[in-house]
Amino acid sequence: MLRRAAAVVVVVASITCVSPARADAADPPGWTPVFSQSFDDAGALPSGCSAYDGAPDGTQAGYFRPEAVTVSDGRLRLALHRRAYGGKPYVTGEVRCLGATQQYGRYEFRARVPTGAGIESVVMLRPVDGQARDVSQLAILARPGDETAVVSNGNGSGTSTKMLPGTFSDWHTYVIEWAPSGFRISVDGRERSADPAVSTQPRWFGFAVTTGDKAGTPTAATALPAEFEVDYLRIWAFAPVSSAPAVASSPTTVEGALPPGGAPPRRWSLWLAVSAIVMSGLALFVLVVRKTRPRRPPSSHRI
């Protein structure tokens, strides 16, 4: 019986030692988490973010209306409708997170853009003072057979533009890093754009779906309404790891924000290691007791 128990303990300990330990992903070096939102609260935008109501700038053919922005099924949804409003032939959605205004930042989100001619899905960093020279954004045009993304980076004195070919109509994870060292965009862990010139002005972050500018207007083949969907959004503040004074200003805390320093780490790896050591010691003890205890003579030798 003891031998069987020891074998079971040894097997469990071995599995524990070789199984990969659960560990929380570490925050990127040089960044402090300040916001995390998975849009699980149906019908409500996080505090600090709001749906914009107003006419867009430039030649866009849509009018931004709050009803075009919804939260349901764990997703933020920005819609484009073929409906006239405010002298525009389309109604579109835009979310502005003014409560997350900061100087420098890292923004990670998982999103799916709508396909069709005349639709432009935009992720933007815009300055509080409204100066166009400090606007940076990622505009995705998922036209059938001609998908592309346009990176525009305003640095205060000019704006650089880069075209990113690829397939963007499925779910992808995007990371935008705006740091003193440069402005970078990654898609699914692969860096697609890098520019050493950056704006130093405080900027807010937002999403929008629009039409009539770079994308043109929808054709008869474009299925409407169309939705730009966001699965989650995480925001970090710049926090230099050197001893030099921090350059970043403190962002305003919004709903879903993490406590200072981020969420407390769970010590899963340490506990599993300790458990493995304890069970291995127990198995060794059982085997020693089994080998050293006095053995009873066979019944045929007993008086």
Image (cartoon, helix red, strand yellow):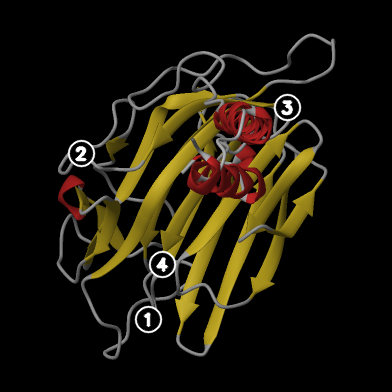
Q: Residues within 10 Å of mark 3 (few under 14, many from 20)?
A: some
- Are discs 2 and 1 less than 8 Å apart at CB? no
> Quick check: 119 left or right of 30?
left
Of 29 and 22, nearer the camera is 22
Of 172 and 25, nearer the camera is 25
- Are discs 4 and 3 less than 8 Å apart at CB? no
Find disc 2 in the rendering and name its residue.
41
Residue 33 placement (x, y as % from top left): 55, 26
Rounded to the nearest angstrom, the CA distance separating label 4 from label 1 is 10 Å
Q: Secondary structure at mark 4?
A: loop
Q: Secondary structure at mark 2?
A: loop
Find disc 4 in the rendering and name its residue.
113
Find disc 1 in the rendering and name its residue.
116
Find disc 3 in the rendering and name its residue.
30
- Are discs 3 and 2 less than 8 Å apart at CB? no
Of labels 4 and 1, the one closer to you:
4
Rounded to the nearest angstrom, the CA distance separating label 2 from label 4 is 22 Å
Q: Earlier in the sequence, mark 3 or mark 1?
A: 3
Amino acid on which the number 4 mark rests in the picture: Val
Amino acid on which the number 1 mark rests in the picture: Gly
Q: Quadrant of residue 138?
A: bottom right
Residue 129 placement (x, y as % from top left): 52, 26
Rounded to the nearest angstrom, the CA distance separating label 3 from label 1 is 39 Å
Amino acid on which the number 3 mark rests in the picture: Gly
Name the residue: 43% across, 66% down: 120
Number of numbered discs present? Answer: 4
Q: Quadrant of residue 183?
A: top right
Q: Earlier in the sequence, mark 3 or mark 2?
A: 3
Of labels 2 and 4, the one closer to you:
2
**Vertical relation: 83 (above or below) 272:** below
Rounded to the nearest angstrom, the CA distance separating label 3 from label 2 is 30 Å
Residue 214 in view? no
